[in-house]
Image (cartoon, rainbow, N blue to C red):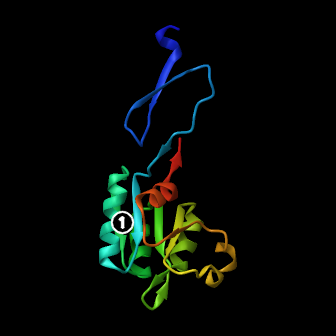
Amino acid sequence: MDHADRSFRIDLQTSEPVMGTSDSEPELTPRPPKDVLIVEDNFLIALDTQEMLTELGVTSVRTAGTVEEALEMIAAQVPDFCLLDVNLGQEKSFDVAERLFALGVRFAFATGYGERDAFPVHFADAAIVSKPYTIDRLRQAIAFTE
């Protein structure tokens, strides 16, 4: 095999190169989004989530604590992915989900409760990340493929 036939990708789990050949089917490699918006009203949960996302390779993590703040942040810069806590004090994050959906932005709801029956019908099958978060749950939720 000469050099033109070889290619490699970086395994995000191990940071090791994985060899492949150009005549084989290209493998889909999970990669983290560059910019993630966390919509979470609990400061400590948001901080912990931000740390885990950074560890997973997300380069920009922004946090909003209310629906209004999240919508303003989305208007200023559309994120690649959004993690939405369902319950934000006295409000729910469904208006933010509507905006993200309209923009074609991937998102997942975050909840510590089994409240899927309270979701609007068109979000009944939306991705959910259960709390408390683990790095593996977050990795699965944010994984994009190239």
Image vertical order of residue 29 relative to residue 46, above or below: above
Residue 90, given in percent of the width and then of the height, sits at 45, 92
What's the residue type where badge 1 is placed?
A: Thr
- The location of residue 7, given as percent across then percent down, is 49, 22
Residue 57 placement, left or right of 126:
left
**Which one is in front, 89 or 130?**
130
Q: Residue at x 54, y 72 (%)?
A: 97
The secondary element bearing badge 1 is classed as: helix
Give the farthest residue toward the top: 2
Depth check: 39 or 1 in front? 1
- Image position of 79 with respect to 89: above or below: above
Name the residue furthest bottom. 90
Residue highlighted by disc 1: 49
Q: Among all residues in the image, which is located at the extreme right?
A: 121
Residue 132 spot, x, y in % from top left: 43, 72
The residue at 50%/12% (across/down) is 4
Q: Residue 102: image x %, image y %?
A: 59, 67
Q: Specify whether residue 80 is in view.
A: no
Residue at the image point whose x is 35% and y is 70% from the top: 63
Q: Quadrant of residue 14?
A: top left
Using the image as rendered, state which of residue 110 and residue 90 is in the foreground: 110
Number of on-image labels: 1
Local packing at callout 1 (Cα closer than 10 Å; few below 14, some 14-19, many 20+) is: many
Residue 90 showing in the rendered view: yes
Asked if residue 117 lies left or right of residue 131, the reply is right
